[in-house]
Amino acid sequence: DSKDGGAPPPAYQHYNTTTPLQHGRKANATIVMLARNGDLDGIVVSMKQMEDRFNKKFNYPYIFLNEMDFSEEFKTRVSGLTDSPVQFGLIPHDDWYQPAWIDETRASAARADMVEHKVIYGGSVSYRNMCRFNSGFFYRHELLKPFKYYWRVEPDIKYFCDLDYDPFLVMQDENKVYGFTLSLFEYEATIPTLWNTVKEFTNSNPGLLPPGNAMDFLSDDGGETYNRCHFWSNFEIGDLDFWRGEAYSKFFDFLDEKGGFYYERWGDAPVHSIGAALFAKKEQIHFFNDIGYRHEPFQHCPQGVAHAKGKCWCDQKQNFDYEWYSCLNKYEALFKS
Ligand code: GDP
Ligand code: MN
């Protein structure tokens, strides 16, 4: 529980929004939502807040993706919430469904084992499809090709504060590749062999890791073991070209070939986080302190001056940042030594 509600945020969290540089400029960016037709009620909640807190001033387009056709009702209700362009994309079959080369006997045994051990989404194939798609395919979708930056939005989230600057321009002007609001520990049971797979990859591709990366966010012993910290990927503002680049592309392909998205339940959050932390410089990972955000059951509520500036409606005392299960302190420690 944070006691310093009145203290200004650390300097690295500041972005000078009065700079004339932002005025009239726009980034090459889109808002992206992966959703099912059945997610519609939660999607409109999220989208209305996106518009009210931010996007009605900035007018970035929306892209909705689904492995099935969106219903007419879905398209109509969503399109009615914004003046911005809205596009609906079908995910190519092979980018979504479990590949034929996955050993289904082994995969189903793994699912049964996770159900028995009550691992969240442990028995779900569709959840695994979703994690694999978000890890390695969404940024290659035809509709995303023209864009460099994206903001990922999920159903039923909350944005607590008015945003009076363009976070995409922060990414662009400061050469950031990944932005987050919440970070936490991953469930060990979903990723038993992930870190060994990561080490196998980095040992054979040492040149892909830049000096000054964020390895210390992921590991407390210089890379030997994974501390399970990850950025929570239901919120992401990121650089699509970073995912499309050589390092992350090779990394994803290597992970995918191991089959851990199906033989275990590797999440897109640890996969993205490990990719960003290893293949970017630590300064390229940005904590969006000003963006008050909730995805059940956690929230980031800006403190002090940031709370006032954004006219945030969250209770400052309800803030995950320094709870025991948060990894924000490990992120901040990157910049203290
Ligand atoms: P959680 O946040 O990990 O509990 O998972 P969610 O149920 O919120 O799913 C994550 C994101 O993927 C959300 O944007 C969902 O709408 C989307 N999603 C999950 N499963 C599917 C699916 O089978 N098909 C599609 N099209 N979207 C999905
Ligand atoms: Mn969710």
Image (spheres, rainbow, N blue to C red):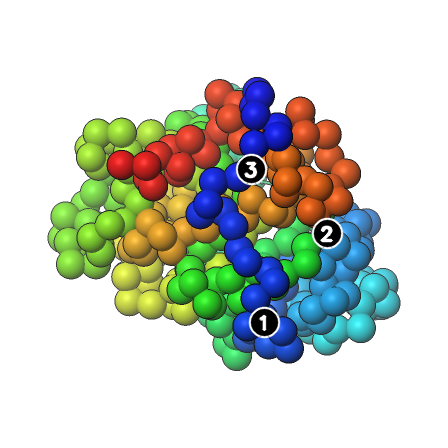
Looking at the image, is mark 2 or mark 3 earlier in the sequence? 3
Residue 287: give x, y in percent of width and height. 49, 46
Residue 64: give x, y in percent of width and height. 66, 64
Residue under pointer 3: 8
From what the image shows, is residue 325 above or below residue 222? above
CB atoms of marks 2 and 1 within 8 Å: no
Q: CA distance from mark 1 to mark 3?
A: 23 Å
Q: Residue at x 42, y 31 (%)?
A: 329
Q: Which mark is residue 20?
A: 1
Q: Secondary structure at mark 1?
A: helix
Which of 164/236 is in front? 164
> In the image, is 222 to the left or to the right of 54?
left
Q: Residue at x 55, y 72 (%)?
A: 21
Mark 1: amino acid: Pro
Which of 223/90 is in front? 223
Q: Which mark is residue 162?
A: 2
Mark 3: amino acid: Pro
Looking at the image, is mark 1 or mark 3 earlier in the sequence? 3
Q: Quadrant of the N terminus?
A: top right
Which of 74/164 is in front? 164
> Within the image, what quadrant is residue 32 found in?
bottom right
Q: Can you tell which of label 2 and label 3 is closer to the viewer?
A: 3
Residue 174: give x, y in percent of width and height. 43, 63
Q: Secondary structure at mark 2?
A: loop
Which of 71/172 is in front? 172
Mark 2: amino acid: Asp
* Crowding near the residue tagged with mark 3, few <14, some 14–19, many ≥20 C-alpha atoms within 10 Å: few
